[in-house]
Image: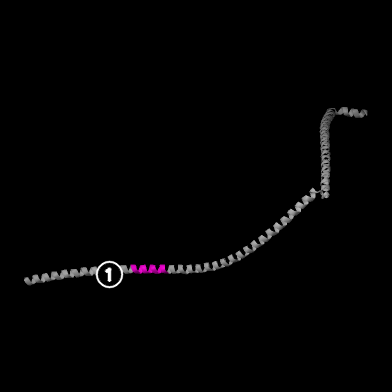
Amino acid sequence: MEDSGDILCQVSAFKDMLDQVNEEIEANIQTTREIESEIVKCDEIENEIATRESGLTKMIFAAEFEMSELIQVSAVARTSLEHLEKELSYLRMKREEVIKRVTDKWEAFIILCRKFQGDITKGEDDELWKLLSQKEVLENENYNLSMKVNALRNSMSAFVEVTLEELHNSNSALEVEIQHQNWENEKLLDDIEELKTSLLATSSSDNNICKHHPHASNNGSDIF
């Protein structure tokens, strides 16, 4: 019995040891799973990092390409700026020359104007006064001619108005006369119609008399 008890104790101890080993195995399996999960996460992170790295590489290449283009554009712009500065300098020089020429011409014009004014005040420009006098005479003649034309236009307008009024009156009288003639013609036509009607009535009555008295007709023929 004691041997059986020892065996049972040993079996129980082995079972406890086996349970402990199983627990350790389960713990190791769980740890392994966690490690595998972490490895998968690390792989995903590495893939994401690789993707980001690829995107950043593309962005770097694009930025370098844009930088190269910007450098070229900057060089072209610098060249254009230098060209524009040269043109601007040339235009400024031409502007100064034009201003100088205009100033010189303006000063010469002022001198000529002053000289012209001096000549006028001294009475040396008689031709101008003659022209002014002729202009005044022509303006007076033009005014008189305009007055005559206006008077003639007014008289013609009055004559036309009177003529139109006379024509209107004549037309009115003619219309009245035509209406009177039309009335007389209508009356004459009515009289003619009445005469025709009376003649037809008389002819019809004569025919009826001849039909009712044939002997009278024969006797009359014998008489003749």
Main secondary structure found in the magenta portion = helix
Left-right relation of 72 to 28:
right
Q: Which residue is more in the foreground, 191 or 30? A: 30
Quadrant of res 12? bottom left
Residue 111 in the image: above or below residue 34: above
Residue 167 in the image: above or below residue 32: above
The percent coordinates of residue 28 (x first, y second) are 24, 69
Left-right relation of 221 to 178:
right
Give the farthest residue toward the left. Answer: 1
Left-right relation of 129 to 102:
right
Which residue was labeled with disc 1?
Answer: 32
Residue 201 in the image: above or below residue 51: above
Badge count: 1
The percent coordinates of residue 162 (x first, y second) are 83, 35
The percent coordinates of residue 6 (x first, y second) are 9, 71
The range drawn in magenta is 41-53
The stretch drawn in magenta includes residue 50: yes
The percent coordinates of residue 126 (x first, y second) are 83, 49
Q: Which residue is more in the foreground, 63 or 6? A: 63
Name the residue type under label 1.
Thr
Left-right relation of 15 to 157:
left
Secondary element at image label 1: helix
